[in-house]
């Protein structure tokens, strides 16, 4: 684990008001993350290139998808801090999304953006000048999805690159006081592919989905901009605030679950006199689990499974080295620190029938092993015959289920 430390010499208050001459102080704030990169100056000895970031993060995305897991990778940070550069890159320095597309095996993908809390298909085609906003639905098993979102079959990287460039060109950007081509929407690039395998003479399919998310940057409202920019910024900040609330609630619930598990272990090892007090505290902590407001924003609704469900999720927090961005930098680092506390429980997306048959076969093998061990011991002939019959009946019932 890498520890990123932020040390600033403050000559006044963070809100701009100057303090008395003796009030200057140095603050050292430390945040722990898995990786820490410096990508400001290419000439610096500790400069982290796009290749290094892909080696650390992109390779794990591909490896997880190959195993059958859902993967989500998203970048969060202040406007102009390098989110789109990290995710998409430039023609001379490609980002994570093109590199993942180049090395992945996929069947189709989709590309959408969330602009002013409305979903737009970025691969709609040039003939549709005013695209109709798409609606978000939720499947009882597969989770949230976008109704009517186009899905494009891709057989090689050239086709994927062409559609990726088309989607980027259709994305809404505008000039702000921080960046001359700031992204005014959240973009979600999805890759999905199916692996057909043969396991124990049984055909099986594993479906993996990769969500690569480029979030719009948080920013302060500026009355000098036109009304459209103010409306865009308000909707961007609304969705990011909701995302922060969701992440904080998920992190709090994860910490409660871990504390509950520790209490259970204490109960199993402790004496009976303390069972009542521990169990009452456990039940009270269970009632305090936070409600997760996924539906308060289209972004969090679409990323419901990625944030707190069936997905392996990676968050990239981008910050600016500028002193004037101190507040935004501190907010981003705290944001990421909360996200790091979330514990997801991803599972392999395989066919339910194949998983059931495999579990039954494992149970049959386990029962046969128990039957064999019991027969070898043979403490009493009558008792042995009775238990042999019960074990044999269970084995026979499981074998019938497998054959069915």
Image (cartoon, rainbow, N blue to C red):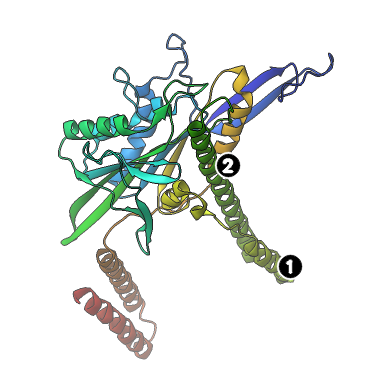
Rendering quarter of residue 154? top left
Can I make out residue 34 in this image? no
Q: Secondary structure at mark 1?
A: helix
Q: Position of residue 63 (x, y in %)?
A: 31, 40
Compared to 194, does 30 lie above or below? above
Q: Position of residue 297 (x, y in %)?
A: 49, 49
Rendering quarter of residue 350? bottom left
In this view, the residue in front, 197 or 308, is: 308
Residue 177: assigned label: none
Q: Position of residue 233 (x, y in %)?
A: 52, 35
In this view, the residue in front, 134 or 94, is: 134
Q: Residue at x 48, y 20 (%)?
A: 38
Compared to 160, does 132 lie above or below? below
Count how many numbered circles sit on residues in the image.
2
Q: Give the labeled residue for mark 1.
A: 277
Compared to 195, does 369 lie above or below? below
Q: Residue at x 43, y 43 (%)?
A: 313
Local crowd size for mark 2, using a 10 Å CA cut-off: few (<14), some (14–19), many (≥20): some
Q: Residue at x 57, y 38 (%)?
A: 335
Q: Give the labeled residue for mark 2.
A: 338
Rendering quarter of residue 28? top right
């Amino acid at each position: 684990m890498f520890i990123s430390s932020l040390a600033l010499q403050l000559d006044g208050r963070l809100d701009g008001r100057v303090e008395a001459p003796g009030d200057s102080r140095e603050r050292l704030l430390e945040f722990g993350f898995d990786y820490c990169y410096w990508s400001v100056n290419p000439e610096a000895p500790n400069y982290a290139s796009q290749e290094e970031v892909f080696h650390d993060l992109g390779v794990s995305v591909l490896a997880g998808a190959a195993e059958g897991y859902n993967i989500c990778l998203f970048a969060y940070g202040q406007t102009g801090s390098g989110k789109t550069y990290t995710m998409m890159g430039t023609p001379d320095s490609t980002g994570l999304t093109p590199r993942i597309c180049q090395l992945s095996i996929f069947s189709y993908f989709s590309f959408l953006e969330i602009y002013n809390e409305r979903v737009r298909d970025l691969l709609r085609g040039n003939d549709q000048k005013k695209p109709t906003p798409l609606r978000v639905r939720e499947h009882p098993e597969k989770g949230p999805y976008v109704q009517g979102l186009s899905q494009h079959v891709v057989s090689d990287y050239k086709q994927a690159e062409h559609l990726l460039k088309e989607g980027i060109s259709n994305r809404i950007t505008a000039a702000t006081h921080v960046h001359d081509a700031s992204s005014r929407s959240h973009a979600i690039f999805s890759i999905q592919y199916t692996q057909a395998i043969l396991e124990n003479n049984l055909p099986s399919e594993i479906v993996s989905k990769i969500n690569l998310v480029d979030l719009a940057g948080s920013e302060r409202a500026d009355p000098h901009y036109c009304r459209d920019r103010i409306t865009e910024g308000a909707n961007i900040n609304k969705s990011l605030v909701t995302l922060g609330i969701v992440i904080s609630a998920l992190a709090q619930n994860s910490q409660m679950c871990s504390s509950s598990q520790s209490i259970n272990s204490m109960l199993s090892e402790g004496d009976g006199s303390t069972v009542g007090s521990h169990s009452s505290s456990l039940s009270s902590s269970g009632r305090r689990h936070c409600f997760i407001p996924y539906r308060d924003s289209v972004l969090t609704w679409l990323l419901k499974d990625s944030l707190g469900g069936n997905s392996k999720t990676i968050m990239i927090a981008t910050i600016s080295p500028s002193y004037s961005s101190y507040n935004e930098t501190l907010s981003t680092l705290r944001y990421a620190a909360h996200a790091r506390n979330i514990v997801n429980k991803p599972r392999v997306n395989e066919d339910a029938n194949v998983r059931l048959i495999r579990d039954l076969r494992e149970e049959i093998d386990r029962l046969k092993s128990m039957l064999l061990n019991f027969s070898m011991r043979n403490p009493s002939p009558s008792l042995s015959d009775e238990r042999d019959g019960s074990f044999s009946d269970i084995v026979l019932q499981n074998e019938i289920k497998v054959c069915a």
